[in-house]
Structure formats: C-alpha cells, structure tokens
Image (cartoon, rainbow, N blue to C red):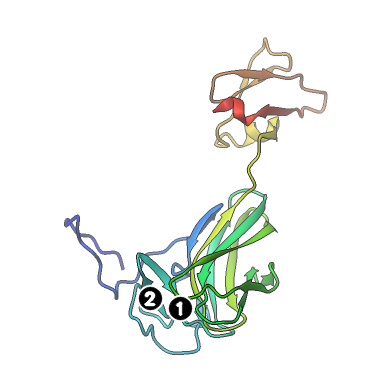
Amino acid sequence: LIVISDDPDYIPPDDVVPSLSRSYVPGQIEAEDYNIGDNGVAYYDTTPGNIYEKYRTDDVDITADGTAIVITDMEAGEWLNYDIYITYSAAYTLSVTGSNGTPGSKFFHIECDGEDITSQVELPPTGDWSTYTTVNIPGLTIEPGAHLLTFVTDSGDMNIDSFLFTTPSVDSVSIEAESAVMQPRFPPFTVQEDENASGGAYMVVPNGSGTTTSVPGDGFAEYSFDLAGTA
C-alpha cells in the first residue's frame, strides 16, 4: 500500500505496510524492512501479531525506540529475510546495531542463500534496552548479484536496529581496461580511443588527467592510478 498526500506534514498511520524493495550492498538495511510476505516465507515468528502495532501489521514485533524503529522481542529460532543485491565483489564488513537489556549475552547468525556465513555472533549486554551497540563482522565475501540474506536469532530477547555493509577504504584501485569498455557505467572512469596514445586508448579520471598504456598482443591492459589524485 502506497499513500499519496499533498500535506507535507502527513505521517502515515501505524497500520500502513511500507512498500519495500531490494536492498543494495554496500549500504544500510533497516531491520524492520525485511521482505513482505507470509510467516515462514518472508520471516518466521512464533507468536501471532505485532503487539506494539508499529510500522507493519504482520507477526513480527516492531517498536519505536526514540527516533528509531526496531525489531524487538525476538525468540530463539525466529528469522527475517532480506532480498539484497551485491553490486561488486569485496570483503565486506557487516555491522549489526542492536541492544540487549538482559544481564547475559545474546547470540545470532547471518545466512546467505541458506548458508551460514558468520557462525554464531555475540550481542553483549548493553545495560538497558535503549542503549545500542554495534557488532562488526569482517571479511564477508559474497558473489555479485541477487541473494537472500537471513538474520537468525540463536537466543531470544534482543532489539535489532540495522545492518550496514561496508568495504575497507583503499588508496588505489586497478581495473582491467576491457572491463571499463564492457561496462561504461563503471564510475568514475572512462576509456577513450586515441590514435596518439601508446596503446591506442587512454583513461580519463575525474580531474581530467589521462593515463596512457600500451596494449599487449592479447588485447588486455591494466590501468592503475592513485584515487587521492582524482578528488
């Protein structure tokens, strides 16, 4: 259901189901934006109804904590599905933000296409339910393309706010020249034909400088440059 209003201050009622779409990685996924669908398909919840009546009207308990909308009251064995799209191959760090108001640690794991990719992850006590912490899970390598991500609780009683996929910062990058030609939308690089360049082509980076290279007999050449020089 999509609500259209000409009132700039309009706030949709709690029973409006959000219109959700696939989440792109790298990027952030709000925990409450799990897939739309039936219990046992889009999510699995052991108790009927959203007892807090916030944000969505299925069986997952969702509450407002300050300005945040969070998943709450999850029991062991419950799970949430998310359609994601990996835009490029990398060693991602997944940062899970949540709270644990109990005196003991809670545990969860993440699955991709039905395979456990994190093993059991600890969410330590945070002192109270309104105090959140972020648990970082580094080194997750997922092939580019569409995947199904699943958050699974291994022990109950935790609040989950969001999932953030990031990649390590880099100072330089190398791409194959033929990849830039085959994928012209690969920003911010362009490869242009130039009969005066040593290899018949040169690369243009955002500051306007070009880098030339000779192309060997196999037709493949690698361009490498310092990202700091393109700012």
User: What's the residue at 60%, 83% (across, down)?
Assistant: 155
Q: Nearer the viewer, residue 73 or 57?
A: 73
Q: Residues within 10 Å of mark 1 (few under 14, many from 20)?
A: many
Total count of labels: 2
Disc 2 and disc 1: Cα gap in Å? 7 Å
Q: What amino acid is labelled 2 in the image?
A: Thr
Secondary structure of residue under mark 1: loop
Q: Nearer the viewer, residue 16 or 227?
A: 227
User: Would residue 91 be found to the left or right of residue 231 on screen?
Assistant: right
Residue at the disc numbered 2: 63
Q: Is residue 141 visible to the viewer in this orientation of the structure?
A: no
Query: Can you give x and y, in whole percent of width and height, for residue 220 in the image?
Result: 76, 29
Name the mark on residue 31: none
Q: Quadrant of the C terminus?
A: top right
Query: Would you identify the image quadrant in which residue 62 lies?
Result: bottom left
Query: Can you give x and y, in whole percent of width and height, for residue 32 in the image?
Result: 44, 70
Q: What amino acid is labelled 1 in the image?
A: Thr
Q: Residues within 10 Å of mark 2 (few under 14, many from 20)?
A: many
When the figure is inspected, residue 16 is found, relative to residue 51, above or below; the finding is: above
Mark 2 and mark 1 residues within 8 Å of each other at the beta carbon: yes
Q: Is residue 68 visible to the viewer in this orientation of the structure?
A: yes
Query: Would you identify the image quadrant in which residue 48 lies?
Result: bottom left
Secondary structure of residue under mark 2: strand
Residue at the bottom extreme, as displayed: 47
When the figure is inspected, residue 198 is found, relative to residue 68, above or below; the finding is: above
Residue at the right extreme, as displayed: 217
User: Would residue 18 be found to the left or right of residue 221 on screen?
Assistant: left
User: Would residue 27 be found to the left or right of residue 49 on screen?
Assistant: right
Query: Can you give x and y, in whole percent of width and height, for residue 55 in the image?
Result: 35, 72
